[in-house]
Image (cartoon, rainbow, N blue to C red):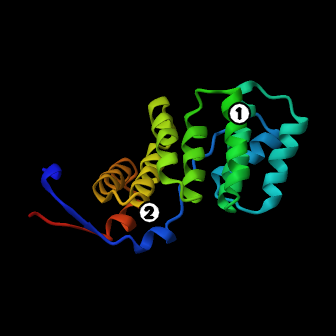
């Protein structure tokens, strides 16, 4: 059983591991949808942040889509390591839609980017509790936070959970390959 297994882990690769971001689908055409597609498609060009900003400034959206557009712009900022600006967008999303799990998970990812590992955990946990469309990314980010806090066992378990939830996503397996599990 895993509880009885002490874990030996190399932490060197943590600084090379990027956080996983979870975008929010916004449909209906227009700039907000283009912003959503850019965030979901892995774009990191600043011009897509401008598309999101223009959507927020000019388009009529329901509350969920407006909050989602803030999340998506924040995701684009995360990719450029603009953690403080990204956090502001996630905060804006949560003021509009406090039950949007992706906003919490991504705000946690921004904290991880700033190496505020313990600070990230309540947000990631809240996002998981509320539900997110890609929970594997939340578990992966929480594993990064645990690893940053030198809690190898918790990190290992969350990387395993991420791999279980998204077996075709290579990132969790790449992180797990660094771990050595042994019995005492």
Residue at the image point whose x is 67% and y is 55% from the top? 83
111 relative to 97, above or below: below
- Looking at the picture, tell me which residue is in the foreground, 41 or 139: 139
Horizontal side of 116 relative to 31 (left or right) equals: left
The answer to whether 146 is drawn above or below residue 68 in the figure is below
Q: Would residue 47 be visible to someone looking at this image?
A: yes
Quadrant assignment for the C terminus: bottom left
- Occupied quadrant, residue 100: top right
Q: Mark number for residue 174? A: none
Q: Secondary structure at mark 1?
A: helix
Q: Quadrant of residue 65?
A: top right
**x, y (%) of residue 124?**
49, 42
Residue 147 placement (x, y as % from top left): 39, 60
157 relative position to 117: left or right: left
Where residue 178 sits, quadrant-wise, is bottom left
The residue at the point 63 percent across, 40 percent down is 24
Q: Is residue 142 left or right of residue 95?
A: left
Q: Name the residue tied to disc 1.
A: 67
- Residue furthest to the right in view is 58
Which SS class for mark 2?
Answer: helix
Marks 2 and 1, how far apart in space? 28 Å
| Residue placed under numbered mark 2 in the picture | 171
Q: Which percent across, then down, holds residue 108?
A: 55, 46
Q: Earlier in the sequence, mark 2 or mark 1?
A: 1
């Amino acid at each position: 059983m895993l509880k009885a297994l002490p874990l030996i882990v190399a932490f060197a690769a943590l600084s090379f591991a990027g956080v996983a971001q979870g975008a929010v689908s916004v449909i209906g055409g227009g700039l907000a949808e283009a912003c959503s597609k850019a965030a979901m498609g892995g774009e990191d060009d600043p011009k897509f942040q401008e598309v999101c900003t223009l959507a927020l400034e000019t388009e009529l959206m329901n509350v969920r889509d407006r909050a989602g557009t803030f999340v998506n712009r924040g995701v684009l900022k995360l990719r450029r390591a603009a953690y403080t600006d990204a956090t502001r967008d996630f905060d804006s999303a949560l003021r509009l839609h406090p039950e949007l799990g992706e906003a919490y998970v991504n705000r946690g990812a921004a904290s991880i980017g700033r190496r505020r590992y313990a600070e990230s955990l309540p947000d990631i946990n809240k996002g998981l509790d509320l539900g997110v469309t890609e929970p594997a990314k939340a578990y992966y980010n929480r594993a990064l936070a645990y690893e940053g806090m030198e809690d190898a066992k918790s990190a290992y378990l969350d990387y395993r959970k991420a791999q279980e939830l998204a077996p075709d996503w290579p990132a969790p397996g790449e992180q797990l390959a660094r771990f050595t599990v042994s019995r005492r």
